[in-house]
Structures are given as C-alpha cells and as structure tokens.
Amino acid sequence: MTHILIAEDEFDIRELLTELLESSGYQVTSAANGMEALKLHQTAAFDLIILDIMMPFFDGFEVAQQIRKSSQTPIIFLTALQDEENQVKGFDLGIDDYIAKPFSLRVLLRRIEAIIRRIQTNVEEELSFREITLFPASYNVLISGNAIILTLKEFQILHLLLEHPGRVLEREQLIQQLWGFEAFGDTRFLDTHIKNLRKKINVPYIQTVKGVGYKLEAHH
C-alpha cells in the first residue's frame, strides 16, 4: 500500500487530508509540525510527502531541504503561499509539485495519482543483504524496513559493499573510487566513515580485513 506522510499544522486540514487519502486507499501518517515530520521521515519509509510551508518547528522549505539531503521521495507543497517566488524556491529545493490553498480535493487526488504512477513506472532497482536494503536512485536505505539517514560518502561506501558481498574491497580501491585520488598510505579518514556507517546501520556485517580493507559478510 502506498504510504503518504502529511505535514500540516492546521488540525482541520490535516484531518480532511487524512480522511480523503485513507478513503482513496492510501496509508497515511500525519505530523503537526516540521520537526515531527523530519522525525517520522527518519524512522519510516514513505512513497510521497505532502508539506505545508508555514509550520512551527521548521517550515516546509527547511523540511524539504533536509529530506533532499538523503532522499528523493516525491514532495508536494500544499500551501497558502501563492506567489511565484515561493513556488520557484520550492522547485529549486527539488519538490515535485506545488498546490496553492484553497485547493480542489479532486485535483489534489489526481496530482497524487500522477506522481504515484510515475513512481510505479520507474520502479528502481534495489540492493539488499540480510536486513539492509539500499535504493541507488533515490538514495534511500532501510534497515529491517526502517529508514536511516546516511551522508553521501557513507551511502556510496555501503553501495559498493552491497554490490560485492563477500568480496574484500581494498582501502586504496575504495578511496580511488569514491574520492578520485590516491591515499598515499593515509586511510584514516576512510576508517572514520566506516566507523560512522557501522554505528548507523547497527548490524554487524561490515567486516575489517586487517591490513587490506573491508567486506560485507554475515557472521556464521
């Protein structure tokens, strides 16, 4: 079932949208402010996000900006701000649609359906290993179905390890591929990224091969 996150501080509108979408067959999770929306995005996987702009504890622009650092999940702005400047600002942040209030419920549903169709016709590949699932195109990572936030380099390291499960990737090889330069013996910055990645995924599959590099392997 398609899972939609709604972030809207006005209770009546939030309830109206929830009822509309649930009656149309969507699973809905709602947030009353920007901070709550970001926390929900970090702990669950959503297929579409509907954001109001003028919300407390991070406005819609700030929420979209944070989400785009780690995810390409489609975002619709649903807002009373109708001026061109805010629309351009939203699209510059990478949102997918901008709908001004007051809005037609029928038109909103059609816009949502159009985005969902686009997602379903462009079903992206995924790489998985045990509890880890990585989506290369959208930069999403799930651990046992829960979304986690990685930096770009952490994501790229995990991506390479998932492409070659069980194979040792040498430190110098990883640095050359991800940073584009020779390490000249100092690979401590890579080790720091690995340490942070291990902490975030919280599953013991990234193994150190002493003096060589790293591999993705489950303990037997």
Image: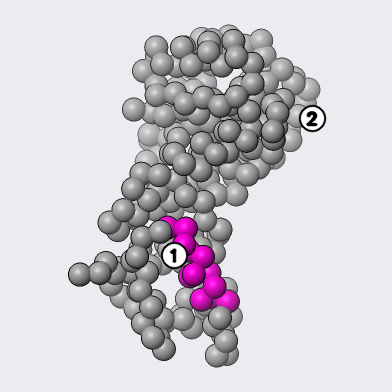
x and y percentages locating residue 121 in the rendered image: 38, 35
Image location (x, y in percent) of residue 71: 53, 45
Secondary structure of residue under mark 1: helix
Q: Secondary structure at mark 2?
A: helix
Instruction: Please tell me which of labels 2 and 1 falls first in the chain.
Output: 2
Q: Position of residue 206 (x, y in %)?
A: 37, 69
Q: CA distance from mark 2 to mark 1?
A: 42 Å
User: Is the residue marked by circle 2 packed among few (<14), some (14-19), or many (20+) residues within 10 Å?
Assistant: few
Choose between 19 and 138: the one closer to the eye. 19
x then y, percent, for residue 7: 58, 26
Residue at horizontal 70 percent and vertical 28 percent from the top: 56
Q: Which residue is mark 1?
A: 198
The amino acid marked with disc number 2 is Glu
Residue at image coords 52%, 56%: 150
Residue at the disc numbered 2: 85
Give the main secondary structure of the magenta stretch: helix
At label 1, the amino acid type is Arg
